[in-house]
Image (cartoon, rainbow, N blue to C red):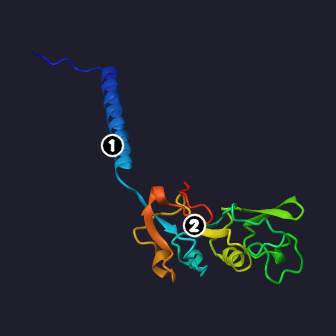
Amino acid sequence: MEKKAENRREFIQKSARLSLVLALGGVGGFALTKTTKDEWVWQIDPFKCTQCGRCESDCVLAPSAVKCIHAYDLCGYCDLCGGYFKPDANELSTAGENQLCPTAAIERKFIEEPYFEYIINEDLCIGCAKCVEGCTSFGNGSFHLQIMHNICLNCNECSIARVCPSDAISRVKSNEAYKVKGDFTTNT
């Protein structure tokens, strides 16, 4: 018996079916591994952080994966914000020489007299902690640092955690990440 040779169309159809089966199997396998294993991520405990500045300089990424976040529930929306203004500011204006942040990552937005809202621009934040230190020293501590998991490489051994003088950085399950001052629930 002579075996009939496949024509080009049949060969392409079989190849396409096989590729589809392999792709679906791969996606299914990937989804299964994602749902069955616990993923661990790095997190900063804002209650332990001493604003040492090492998050900016010791992260393997430049700029750092650590960013300032704002716990709006704690904020007093003050006209004189210790996290926004330098302690020796000439006046309460948005001029660069009056701002504590070296990259102007904090936007000051007027709400009504005497209240202002402070918004962090994550793209400009370098994780230096100057605003966090100012807010903690002269305010209610509504600014704090956190590792952004969408940026972080999730290194097996975090270079910042190794040098953190207050042991504020630890591994936690991803569903327990983003501890925030003022809100003791999990944020994702």
Image position, residue 82 (x, y; %): 76, 76
Which quarter of the rendered picture does the N terminus lie within?
top left
6 sits to left or right of 142: left
Q: Say what secondary structure mark 1 lies in.
A: helix
Q: As shown in the figure, which amino acid type bears the numbered disc 1?
A: Gly
Which quarter of the rendered picture does the C terminus lie within?
bottom right
Image position, residue 54 (x, y; %): 56, 79
Examine the image and state in which quarter residue 25 appears.
Answer: top left
105 sits to left or right of 19: right
Give the farthest residue toward the left.
1
Residue occupying the point 45% across, 72% down: 158
Is residue 133 among the parts visible in the rendering?
Answer: yes
Image position, residue 33 (x, y; %): 34, 48
On the image, numbered disc 1 is attached to which residue? 29
67 to 1, vertically: above or below: below
How dense is the environment of label 1, judged by Cα within 10 Å: few (below 14), some, or many (20 and up)?
few
Tell me the mark number nearer the camera, choosing from 1 and 2. Answer: 2
Question: Closest to the observer: 152 or 180?
Answer: 180
Image position, residue 63 (x, y; %): 60, 69
Question: Closest to the observer: 185 or 107?
Answer: 185
Q: Earlier in the sequence, mark 1 or mark 2?
A: 1
Examine the image and state in which quarter residue 64 appears.
Answer: bottom right
On the image, numbered disc 2 is attached to which residue? 146
Please report contact status of discs 1 and 2: CB closer than 8 Å, yes or no: no
